[in-house]
Amino acid sequence: MPETLSFYLLAGLSVVASTLVIGQGNPMYSVMMLIASFAGLAGLYILLDAPFVAMAQIIIYAGAIMVLFLFVVMLLNAPQEDAAEWDRTHPLRRPAWARLGAAMGMLLAVQLVWALSAATGLTEPVGSRGGAATISSVRELGRVLFSDHGFAFEATSILILVAMVGAVVLARREGES
Amino acid sequence: MNVQLLAQFVVVFAAFFLLVNMSAVLVLAERKVMGFMQQRYGPYLVGPHGVLQPLADILKLLMKEELRPKGADKWLFTLAPVVAVTAAFAAFATVPFGGETTLFGLLDQPLKLGAADVNVGVLVVFAITSMGVYGIVLAGWSSNSKYALFGGLRASAQMISYELSYATALAAIIMLAGSMSVREMVDSQTGYWFGFIPKWYVFLQPVGFIIYFIAGVAETNRAPFDFPEAEQELVAGFNTEYSSVRFALFPQAEYINMVTVAAVATDLFLGGWHGLLPFYTPLDSLIEEWNIGWMVFFAKIGGILFFYIWMRWTVPRYRYDQLMKFGWKWLLPASVINLLVTAAMMLYFNA
């Protein structure tokens, strides 16, 4: 019973906070809500008997990445972007690119539905599969990550690289070479 | 009432009580040590030799008016000191401060001295410590003041830069100990090499210890890394606009974080409650026999904290670009090389 209750509490926190992230006018509040959402997720991982993943979530996302976000928000000091201007002039808003983006979005949605419906063993706790989160389970996690899921791991790193290039392209002002 | 549970509550409360008072004692210690180093007495008027000075300071702060600047963000301005001090207290939760005791046979099962024993304890300490930066950053941003904003900016940049080295130094120790529970890591340091050198990790990881300590000083925003509150440049940095209790919480969080860094250093590098001095003395056997390891633990913490204060009044503050250069170009490569060498040595000697 307490587990079910805490599951709904934490899941509710994550969902509500994630919704509020995109519902805030002030980017500072968005960052705060995202941290709250990560905290809820970390709690869910602990419920799943995966404390290592929970702590990694807090350390990497809430601890490092969100501090970087805050840094950027503070550095820009929360300017109000002119959305209409951006809509008209930005190169990525041309119809061809927009269509490509829409198609990719559809593909992602289909993939998600497919992956979630094909997943098995969702009812059994993760801990019973990998053992308790001692160093051996961390070692096992590393082994699985770099052998069985090696392709996904490498593909993700390339994805992050692409995102980085994308950020540079977006941040570059027009007319600069 | 379950006696075991009650005893555990007492231990948790003792840890809390200890941290609250540590911050007061450290304020006094800092001023006394500073006074000694500058050939004067330090606070001397309140109580004998000025020992009640922290009490007077706290009373003064409590009675001051709470100000909030116009245009400050109401919610975040109030939230910031709360976040700072909560994270500081919570980080100590998984730090054990003594071996097992039955309280002179009062309890059926031995009680572990420490608020909580989690099997990913090191990571919990690190995760919650890294949450503490939000207190400082939010304080800087929500004050609606240029100086405070610069303080917050510096804090976030400094934290990200030094957290990497800090975590990498910890990773080497985790590999050596083969565990992430702080208690198991302490207990893997029992015994002696050649009969007189205690098996502390500081002897296996001297570079790691130095990196951890430097990064720890930077994480707690202490001189020579106190950029977020550099007086000469930023008035008082991130807490410029704070007054009264809200202001008092920031130094308190800083001192508690100092205690946590010192406690983790003691647990992971200096053998925790095993062995008093870096060589065998008959005192060690006596300590084990009487089961007063926690006193040894606090003696070591005291030593490290004295070093902290000593450093603050000895080393001048760096320039900001020197801080970044040092963090990224020296400390981080050094910690990565340390990690690689440790891993290679472990493979070489085990295989």
Image (cartoon, coloured by chain):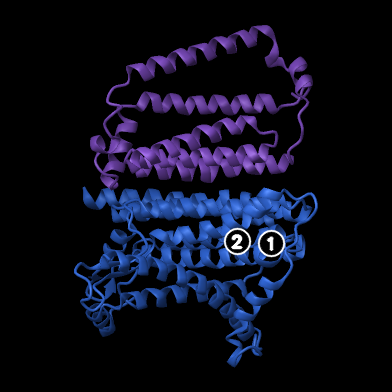
The residue at 31%/69% (across/down) is B7
Are discs 1 and 2 located on one and the same chain? Answer: yes
B262 left or right, relative to B341: right
Q: Residue type at mark 2: give it.
A: Asn
Mark 1 Cα shell of 10 Å, populated few (<14), some (14-19), many (≥20): many
Where residue A18 sits: x, y (%)? 55, 32
Residues at discs 1 and 2 in contact (Cβ within 8 Å): yes
Where residue A2 sits: x, y (%)? 34, 43
Q: CA distance from mark 1 to mark 2?
A: 8 Å
Q: Chain A hue?
A: purple
The residue at 51%/70% (across/down) is B20
| Quarter that holds the C terminus of chain A | top right
Q: Chain of mark 1?
A: B
Where residue B117 sits: x, y (%)? 32, 58
Where residue A160 sits: x, y (%)? 52, 28
Q: Chain of mark 2?
A: B
Above-or-below relation of B291 to A141:
below
> What kind of element bears circle 1?
helix
On the question of residue A165 being in view, the answer is yes
Q: Quadrant of residue A31?
A: top right
Q: Which chain is blue?
A: B
> What kind of element bears circle 2?
loop
* Viewer-proximal residue among B59 and B18: B59
Above-or-below relation of A172 to B66:
above
Please name the residue that numbered disc 2 is placed on.
B221
Taking the view exactly as shown, the residue that stands out farthest to the bottom is: B48
Q: Residue type at mark 1: give it.
A: Glu
Above-or-below relation of A10 to B161:
above
Please name the residue that numbered disc 1 is placed on.
B229
The residue at 42%/63% (across/down) is B264
